[in-house]
Image (cartoon, coloured by chain):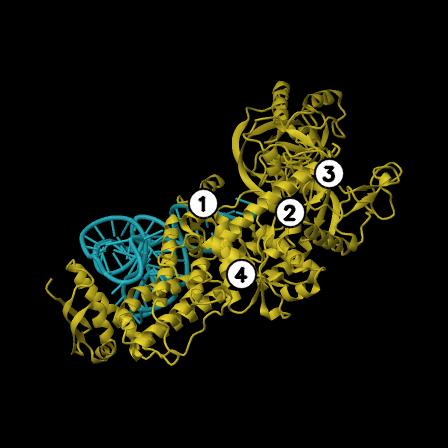
Chain colours: A yellow, B cyan
Amino acid sequence: MPDRPSLDGLDAKWADRWERAGVYRFHAPGDRAAVFSIDTPPPTVSGSLHVGHVFSYTHTDIIARFQRMRGKHVFYPMGWDDNGLPTERRVQNYYGVRCEPSKPYDPDFRAPEPVGKKGDRGVQSISRRNFVELCEQLTAQDEKAFEETWRKLGLSVDWSMTYTTIGRHAQRVSQTSFLRLLRAGEAYQAEAPVLWDVGFRTAVAQAELEDRDHAGAWHRVAFHGPGGQPIHIETTRPELIPACVALIAHPDDERYQGLFGGTVRSPIFGVEIPVLAHPAAEPERGAGIAMCCTFGDLTDVQWWRELKLPTRTVIGRDGRILADPPSGLDDPEGRKAYAELAGATVHTARERIVAMLRESGDLDGEPRKTVRPVKFYEKGDKPLEIVSSRQWFIRSIAHQDVLLERGAELNWHPSYMKARYDDWVRGLNGDWLISRQRFFGVPFPVWYPLDEAGEPRYDAPILPSEDALPIDPSSDTPPGYAEDQRGRPGGFVGDPDVMDTWATSSLTPQIACGWETDPELYAQTFPMDMRPQAHDIIRTWLFATVLRAELDGHTLPWRHATLSGWILDPDRKKMSKSKGNVVTPIDLLEQFSPDAVRYWAANGRPGTDTAFDQGQMKIGRRLATKLLNASKFVLGFPRPAGGAACTEALDRAMLAALDDVVRQATEALEAFEYTSALERIERFFWFFCDDYVELVKQRAYDEAGGPATESARLALRTALSTLLRLLAPFLPYSAEEAWSWWHDDSVHTSPWPTPGAAEGDARVISLASSTISAIRKAKSDAKRSMRAPVESVRVVGPRGELRTIETISGDLRAAGNVESLELTPDDDHELRIEVSLADA
RNA sequence: GGGCGCGUAGCUCAGUGGAAGAGCACUCGCCUUACAAGCGAGUGGUCGCAGGUUCGAACCCUGCCGCGCCCA
């Protein structure tokens, strides 16, 4: 036991010992009921950890530690989400490279020096395989740094079970699951219009969209009616005029009754276009008649599908106008005009076409500026386009009802978060698009035979056997073929796409629990007990995981979902990356100690956004330091003899009150309410230090010993043992340090306290506190030391209360340095305490 | 536009039908043999606003205002 206990250095000391002793190692007990399994969110390693991570992962760790002390075998693996676009982007920016799939692999390629500043040097094109290798190298580095932070924070993770979402095991699980869905008809591919990000050149899913206000302008444009009369439409996207396949108005719109069923000619391009009626047209919007294009928005897709309209694609996957005009654009003048647009970006094409319309007199008035919500890919910086392409989907629309049922079975913490899930499931408007035209991800384990013309036969995919997984169809050869047949007529070709990150991370329970690879482990850990995550990814991660477990086994993946809030900066705004990076988690842990940072995190209630508050960390640091000092004080007394008993009223009352705290804290933690558990424990702890310890100090010091002294020493030790264990989930380092002063085992594997048989009078405590308070106030008012002698304390009040005070009068006199304590009955008035100080 | 949450002391937040609370900050004190990185005491509130229910409302109901988030 050190002379001056300190928090500094505890993390290094204990993180190392815990690892060596295997304190958090999972040992399968052979019994599902004895396990508590946690589906830890794999953080995206393409960024840096920020205080928000520290916040929410601490919440999970508190529950993990509590359940472990409750006797559960806690299954608590960590994963790293390293696959997917965020990693690609990080690698591109970090090394200044770009993946060029047509380039051959360079076996001698060495990772370039990291880019110092943007624009320092040109971007280097490298082969897909070299690019993937760079991704693997950089994520390995990032993962190491993440693990260090987590260990320092004191997460009680079993690090021997760490997985990554790009690792072999995850790929195997992901591909196995995909093949099964494919065989069951739950996964399918289709040529369909999909939302497309032209910057990243990939399809994106509904869950990855966000609406952003985007500046644009209404253009009033004349189409030409049968008699040459102008039919005006209003559009924000005049560059899509060559893609126009119909004009559409509401069936009840009187203005256009005469035109329905007829045709008009498009300006500039001179294409004959039908005028049709459809209820999705909004009479109030613009001119009430809209041009339907391939594809301007999701309504265009709906019209195209329902009215069986032709396709006139003009925007390519790079966001530029295609070189060749679409079918139907036959007019020579029109083709000439189109040629001036070919190759231009959407923005440029719009400017040119506006100039043409102005020239031809088909632009009515000037464009009117507007701001309207436009769909963006959440990671993208250009509006999404809609392009038709072949993509993989997982069925979800067909399962909406059962998904809602599963949502109702799940225990949500806090419960109101369920509404977000329900909203999302009810609002699904298509199946889940899982293919991405990217490089660093889990490949689709599929090849296609090539026909005589060298065209892939998408309807006859070649599938690997499950035991061959994981495979990469771009380098592995399908069964029955030789590698030299790749890409040749009559040969084969691999599916070029990779799965979206969520398509793999929606399987974290299966990946972590050993689905199809470790049946024993799986039986003891799945369905998991707890899924902690942030509330903003209910529509992605939570939803997708529920879907996959349903499709695979008609089960929920876990019993409880716990949703953490966000960290807000002091201005109540969501903590931005730049701000979060000003103070890195490591800096915080160094400055305040892990226990202090955890204390701050533990004060953020489940689901509630919480302010970043270094003040709370200071308080946490104070609490942890106090715990060490109080422990040192209690353990400084001789150990009570074997036959010692708590005989004194104050000791018994204190232990009884502590039992209540144990009950309340246990109940709260069982319900994942770590904040109220901490609040109750903490409140008691300060009472223990400030009042109880002060009151029994003299009695405990008494070198003559005796039953009353033994009672105090025993009560102090008993309470300390309980308090250290109650605080261990929150302050694992200081609790472990103090515990180690008188135990050989770890506090984190010792049993969670249970209420004892202590019987005590709760009134004793409140009367003790109010009496000693009155004495202190008298001294404080007189600006005297707390040790100043008191000539007399006169307590006047009801006999019952006086009798209670009588039982603790010795402690009160000793603590207050009181010469005489006088008790005067007065049953007609409330308790009154008069204090007379001795002369200075 | 729909849904969810929030609004209590200068700040961060507890309290969900029975006497308005804690910590921080601030003020005034105290070397007190665990802790001065400590301890004691004090100042501070129209519980967003307006109605309603009730013997009694910060708490339940209705409406409004403000903030945030999710979804269209």
Is label 3 in contact with label 2 (beta carbons under 8 Å)?
no
- Separation of disc 2 and disc 1 at Cα? 30 Å
Q: Which residue is mark 1?
A: A587
Q: Quadrant of the C terminus of chain A?
A: bottom left
Q: Which residue is mark 3?
A: A309
Please name whichever residue, B38 or A45, is drawn nearer the observer in this view of the structure.
Answer: B38
Q: Which residue is mark 4?
A: A412
A752 displayed left or right of A319: left
Q: Which residue is mark 2?
A: A501
A108 displayed left or right of A587: right
Q: Chain of mark 3?
A: A
Where is residue A72? Give x, y as percent.
55, 68
Q: Identify the amino acid type marked 2.
A: Thr
Is label 4 in contact with label 2 (beta carbons under 8 Å)?
no
Is label 4 in contact with label 1 (beta carbons under 8 Å)?
no
Residue drawn at the location 51% of the way across and 54% of the way down: A57
**Tag 3 and tag 2 share a subunit:** yes
**Precedes in sequence: disc 4 or disc 1:** 4
Q: Chain of mark 1?
A: A
Where is residue A785? Give x, y as percent.
18, 60
**Precedes in sequence: disc 2 or disc 1:** 2
Q: Identify the amino acid type marked 4.
A: Trp
Where is residue A714? Give x, y as percent.
36, 74
